[in-house]
Image (spheres, grey):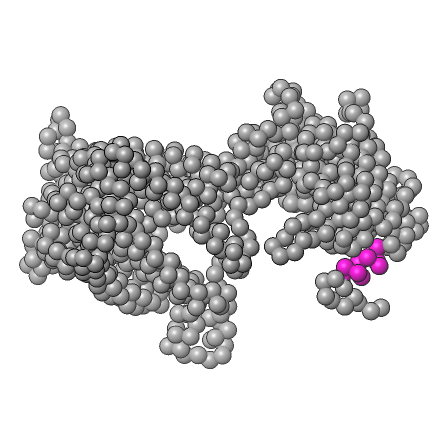
Amino acid sequence: MDSEISPGSSITIRNLTKVFSGERKNLLALSQVNLDIPSGQITVLIGPSGCGKSTLLNMIGGFERPTEGTIFMDGKQIEKPAPDRGFVFQDYALFPWRTVLGNVMFGLVNTGWKKKEAEEQARRFINLVNLNGFEDAYPHTLSGGMKQRVAIARALAYDPKVLLMDEPFGALDAQTRKFMQQELERILMQTCKTVVFVTHSVIEAVYLADRIVVFTARPGTVKGVVEVDLPRARKYTDDAYLDTRGQVLSLLEEEVEKEIQQDGLEPPQD
Amino acid sequence: MLTKDYSYTIPGVTEHGFKQQLLRAVRFLMPFLIIGGLWEVSARAGWVHSSSLPAPSAILGSFWQLAWVKGVLWKHFISSLYRLVVGYLLATVAGVTVGALLSLRPTFRLLFEPVLSLLVSVPSIAWVPVLLIILGLDSRTVIAAVFLGAFFAITYNTMRGIETVNKNLVNAARLMGVNRVRLFFSVLLPGSLVSLITGLRLGIGYSWRALVGGEMLAAMVKWGLGTMVFQARFWNDVSMMFVGIIIIGLSGYLLDRTFLRWLEVVTVERWGMLATQK
Amino acid sequence: MKNKKNLIAAIPVVLFLVGWEILARNKVVNQALFPPPTVIAVELADLFFKGLPVQSELLNHVGETLVRVGLSFSLGLLVGMILGVAMGLSRLTYFFFNPLITMLMPIPGIALAPLFIVWFGFGNETIIPLGVLSAFFPVVYTTVAGVRSVDRQLVQAAQIMGASRWKVISSVYLPWAAVYVFNGMKLGLARCWMTVIAVEFIAATNWGLGYLILSSSDNMRADIVYGGIFLLIVIYFVLERGVIHTLENRTIARWGMIHST
């Protein structure tokens, strides 16, 4: 699992704007986003609800096209989904009609692996996420945490240069979530991929990120970037950790209040 | 739908303005206009026998003849409608009553539910040969077929509906001190309405099919849409057949879409009880 | 547990038959109109043995109907699935066919029978096409709904893992739609069975369960009519349980995708 891995790619986003045309009016989701995602690092996108971070991730994935602006990966413009990237969805998006093994093998088979080697490679990744013994299980029999691990294995198996994760632990309970953060850290430390990770949770962001990008409320744009230099493996209660957390929170709180006001509610007074 | 930019769109106009509704209506009619046009052309050019496949204009002409010049279409339609209404109303009254009674005791439910569910799946027209022997070849057979077609479906769905009323509603009512009669009318019946209406909708579909089939098989029936289509064969009048078939289809469609949809809207949809609203 | 339920379900049927037998034997009801169940059973058995060992008359009738249903259902299913998938994936196809299907679906198969008789004549030439139509409509309708309801994320996941357009269709759209297709299949089989029998009433000339029932009715043979109806119910029951349930259990039940209606 070392010399076979390709180094991660870098992503360059320039003047990115996204408008959704709706029934009666248009929605400006992202406005003039300029962002660099360095290769081999874990970049976390964080911001209030509706700030467009998921939309941005979808565009890096190739599922949506920007209205204006460009996204480049290693110098080439991103136009459609392709197996040089991997995507982990919040709702797992596992194929219910395929076993765990079948799911993880899917990307491998599509990228030209022969069936026998694909199966071996898939088993290696299932092992990596600690799901040995579940290769022949159908997704509906698995717990949320297990399903997400399958999704991660599936996205990593065909060795994409960039891993995109859209609030992957959002549907899990607090305990499982914490466990998964640690699992993910362990897994990612064994590769040197570029990771773009979207989350709501500052705790999660500081735990996982090398770099945190804070977004403004809708229309989303980059409010600030916090470099995270903490050593791995991280601890939630370290002073340095808490400091960084404070930094991010101060950037974020203002935007969260703005977003609550946009929704027509009064932000809590404290 | 896989569109070129890989963003997923769902077909269908979602706007609601008048212009959009007009566009939608035109788009709906387009296939009919295209096919109708091709049809008319092939009929006129003689590519098909006018005796087996008359042009749409000929069919319209026939419709005009039957409806106004000779006035018979109306009589056929009313006769069919009469039989449908009588049979269906009887089935509704009987079905709801029996279904309600059966739902009151668990033993009845256990005993009769499987049998009923099986009877619902019997094609309504299968009863006609029996009815022909018992009741004869006239209108009564058709009405009885209409009745049977709807009765089982309505009974079964009423029973299931009452059975599956949310237990919490029943308990809440009981706590508030209702007696059994009030419980039935003010909780069980409204609570079972969704299922009941499903039963009514299924029933009208089965009844309509039974009506058309029954009219075709009951030889002494002289007036009726089914009869009209059947007899047109003896006069080799394909146009008349088409008129009959179109009206049969249209009526069946409208029966479900308008009357029962209206019923649904003013009761269960208003109360937010449809599954699609939950 | 299941057997107990079946036993209880059988009680009203048994009571009904016993009551009927008693009333008929004691001439309380007209025996010609309501022959006792024992007489019916005897007549059915007679028909079964008639013509053996070469062939059984009863089996010939039933067999003819089953062949018609089998053929027309398969054809209707195939065409329905293909068109349904096409309509789900292509806007143009959808907008062209959907209005036609919406308007033609409510026409009872039997209403079209006289027309088809004029065009194609009596017998299978009319019965089979109508059977195909009756299976086709429910299948295409549900298949379209299934394809259009595919979870978008599954499509995206397949795309980003390098699946070509065809691969996305075959590995995401089709399996997803399978649940809906099964519902359509159930409905389609029911409709096909009903329509074939009904059209046989009018258009069959010598063989078929429907033909048997109606000709017996013409001859005032109530016993065979009842027997025929009984067979009708039983065979349909077996078809639905046997064929469709087993198929279902092999596929969508395993995937955890059953939606109970």
Q: Nearer the viewer, residue C3 or C184?
A: C184
Would residue A188 be counted in the magenta stretch? no
Q: Residue at x 52, y 31 (%)?
A: C170
Residue C185 pos. (x, y %): 38, 41
Work out whether C5 lies above or below C50. Answer: below
Q: Residue at x 81, y 49 (%)?
A: A221
Q: Quadrant of residue B48?
A: top left
Classify the position of the N terminus of chain B by image quarter. top right
Instruction: Give the main secondary structure of the magenta stretch.
Output: helix
Residue C127 pos. (x, y %): 23, 37
Q: Residue at x 63, y 41 (%)?
A: B7
In the image, taking residue A156 as reference, residue B95 lies left or right, namely left
Asked if residue C178 shows in the view, the reply is no
Look at the image and give the residue range highlighted in magenta: A252-260
Work out whether B258 lies above or below C166. Answer: below
Q: Nearer the viewer, residue A258 or A123?
A: A258
Would residue A258 be counted in the magenta stretch? yes
> How many numbered circles are shown?
0
Q: Quadrant of residue C167?
A: top right
Residue A92 pos. (x, y %): 65, 42
Residue B218 pos. (x, y %): 13, 52
Q: Nearer the viewer, residue B67 or B249?
A: B67
Q: Quadrant of residue A249?
A: bottom right
In the image, taking residue C144 as reference, residue B102 lies left or right, namely left
